[in-house]
Amino acid sequence: MIKTGIYYAYWVSDWDTGFIPFIEKAGTLGFEVLEVNAGTISKMSRKERTEIRNAAEYAGISLSACIGLHPSSDIASEDISVRTRGIQHLHSIGDAMKDCGIDRLSGIIYSSWPGKLEGRSISKQQALAYSIASMKEAVKTAEDNDLVYNIEVVNRFEQFLLNTAAEAVEYVRTVDSPNLKILLDTFHMNIEENSMYDAITTAGPHLGHFHLGENNRRPPGGLVGFSWKDIFSSLHAIHYDGWAVMEPFLNPGGEVGRDISVFREIMPAADLDEEAKKSCEFIKGIIRSFTDESAPALI
Amino acid sequence: MIKTGIYYAYWVSDWDTGFIPFIEKAGTLGFEVLEVNAGTISKMSRKERTEIRNAAEYAGISLSACIGLHPSSDIASEDISVRTRGIQHLHSIGDAMKDCGIDRLSGIIYSSWPGKLEGRSISKQQALAYSIASMKEAVKTAEDNDLVYNIEVVNRFEQFLLNTAAEAVEYVRTVDSPNLKILLDTFHMNIEENSMYDAITTAGPHLGHFHLGENNRRPPGGLVGFSWKDIFSSLHAIHYDGWAVMEPFLNPGGEVGRDISVFREIMPAADLDEEAKKSCEFIKGIIRSFTDESAPALI
């Protein structure tokens, strides 16, 4: 059954933080997964990573990791030293994940975040070729440690290489590793895909991770918003059995507000814990409706 | 009745161009309005502007103008010389519009495009205060010449000041000129607003212009996409009688592809004229259904 999770940065203004309080909070609010920042764990000591692993095991929470590579570690760069740094960074992230007991990474791991075509001396096709060659190296850590790396399809304003599920499928087919899959995110699909159903179907067996968020990154559910039953019906149709991690961002300020481009309170005066809890219950209810045979059939 | 239009840049790769062929094309395809680039007409001679005016009159096409101010003309800048340049630029645009017989301007005329908060030495509130003070000056050209300036609400990746209709309403109320109104665009609302219906209702009598586009900037209509009947029903409910101008962007390359962040063919091998014509017919049909009393009522 699909597990429901939340990204820790929902609660913080700056990316680097200790994750243990959020492991406990996620469990209390009903989540089964906490997604953490892969960059942060890669900077931690082995002792700190072991503490995270133990805290997650104690709370019964699974962990996933996410990152957008910094432009100085862009594995699609025309500069070989930048690509090499990126591949090395992905290797150390793989090591850090192992220490934390994390088996899946996702994000903009195929280039940089943000990543513009403008300013590069190469074309999109050339950048893609560099990225694919780098990824064939980087994914070896995943293959050696039974990890899955998921390339995140994002909107045009954050990256130029992979804006659609179709582009991502072509990428993973070219790299051709069972440890390389795709992350689709409803916020990004809503900007780029003709149809979320088609995008999920196109990803099919290559879909390794899934991010949830309403159109403006509110937590899923509420009076207006996406048709989550249809979205999970599409996931059900392709037999998706990965995790569904919400990635809401509601407040401006700090590194997170700056990097996510949040310039106003998206839900003024919202109680973050309460909204997360409601959204978690809502999503878990939908997931149950597809697995519980006693639930009414969806049309 | 709402007139249906199209933005000329649908057909070009670079912003500066002659508009007369597109005036004729728009008419042939069924449109009643062509929207042109205000920056381009501001650089034209009076003779060239008169030719545009005559061509539009001859074709029976109304013209509107649109611009995103360059950062060097940002009227929200902390640098008084940049703000002054922006105000001057808006004055010369107003003069150029008069020569062309254009009575409405819209776009990011309250700051710059693109416009990030990062890198400024002032807060969003301070930038907003500079913008409003500048606009009180700039709008005088509109007041003196019976023009309407419409501030465009755009997504977070293109501007930080006005991402929602509610923010724009507060802005125009503060400037308090009958010649300053709001442009809402379905592409941008889809990223930022909880509900397009609420956004249109919030703008209400302040709505002076309206842009159409599907979620990924395809022309309106087709097998999947927004509920255009609901969108026009919302416009009907607020008695909107301005124009509805589609602003599709389908192809990468050139200044336009770069600035709009199009990195792939959104509709591969599409016949641009044919798609525009189909979309124009579709939108005009919906508009007629709200004004033709013999048309079946919409639920």
Image (tube, coloured by chain):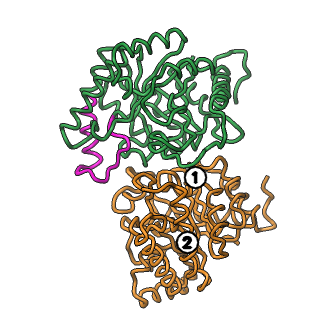
Chain colours: A green, B orange
Q: Position of residue B148 (x, y in %)?
A: 61, 76
Query: Disc 2: which chain?
Result: B
The kind of secondary structure element at disc 1 is loop
- Residue at mark 1: B222
**Circle 2 — which element?**
helix
Give the answer, above or below, for where A237 lies relative to A124.
above
- The quadrant where residue A18 appears: top left
| Residue A162 falls left or right of residue A251 | left
Mark 2 or 1, closer to the camera:
2
The kind of residue tagged 2 is: Met
Residue B243, magenta (yes or no) = no
A119 is within the stretch colored magenta = yes
| Mark 1 crowd level (few <14, some 14–19, many ≥20, 10 Å Cα) | some
The residue sitting at 29% across, 29% down in the picture is: A175
Q: Which span is picked out in magenta?
A: A110-136
Separation of residues labelled 2 and 1 (CA atoms): 39 Å
